[in-house]
């Protein structure tokens, strides 16, 4: 599937908030999978060495699907809750890749 967009995001839980962030991420995954058919993969990972380090791996079938994800109120609600509850320390690092083969 050429032109698939892959997003890799890294975030760090605030000290002692790793489990709370993991719980919120599980809720977010369920909501996105239900509401966004253009999202092919939406999977958070937690470091096995550092329980406060997380990485998100996401794939979207095309630019329109990724744009729909960014505009989805579910994402805004997740971010607002994450900030309100003080779950993240520092900035979230995001890199976007485009597949070059099928």
Image (cartoon, helix red, strand yellow):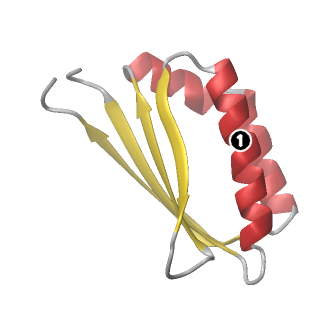
Task: Residue 8 in the image: state x and y as whole percent.
Answer: 41, 51
Q: Nearer the viewer, residue 41 or 69?
A: 41
SS assignment at label 1 = helix
Q: Residue at x 77, y 82 (%)?
A: 16
Task: Residue 57 in the image: state x and y as whole percent.
Answer: 45, 47
> Quarter holding the C terminus?
top left
Q: Residue at x 63, y 76 (%)?
A: 52
Q: Residue at x 56, y 21 (%)?
A: 68
Residue denoted by label 1: 28
Rendered view: 54 above or below 60: below
Lateral position of residue 26 relative to residue 50, left or right: right
Asked where in the image residue 21 lies, by quadrant, the reply is bottom right
**Residue 87 in view, yes or no:** no
Lateral position of residue 29 relative to residue 24, left or right: left
Lateral position of residue 90 relative to residue 76, left or right: left
Task: Residue 35 in the image: state x and y as whole percent.
Answer: 68, 20
**Residue 19 in view, yes or no:** yes
């Amino acid at each position: 599937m050429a032109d698939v967009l892959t997003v890799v995001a890294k975030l760090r839980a605030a000290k002692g908030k790793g489990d709370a962030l993991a719980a919120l991420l599980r809720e977010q995954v369920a909501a996105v999978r239900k509401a966004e058919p253009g999202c092919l993969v939406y999977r958070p990972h937690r470091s096995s060495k550092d329980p406060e380090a997380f990485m998100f791996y996401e794939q979207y079938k095309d630019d329109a699907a990724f744009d729909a994800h960014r505009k989805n109120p579910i994402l805004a609600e997740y971010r607002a809750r994450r900030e309100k509850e003080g779950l993240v320390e520092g900035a979230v690092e995001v890199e976007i890749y485009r597949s070059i083969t099928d």
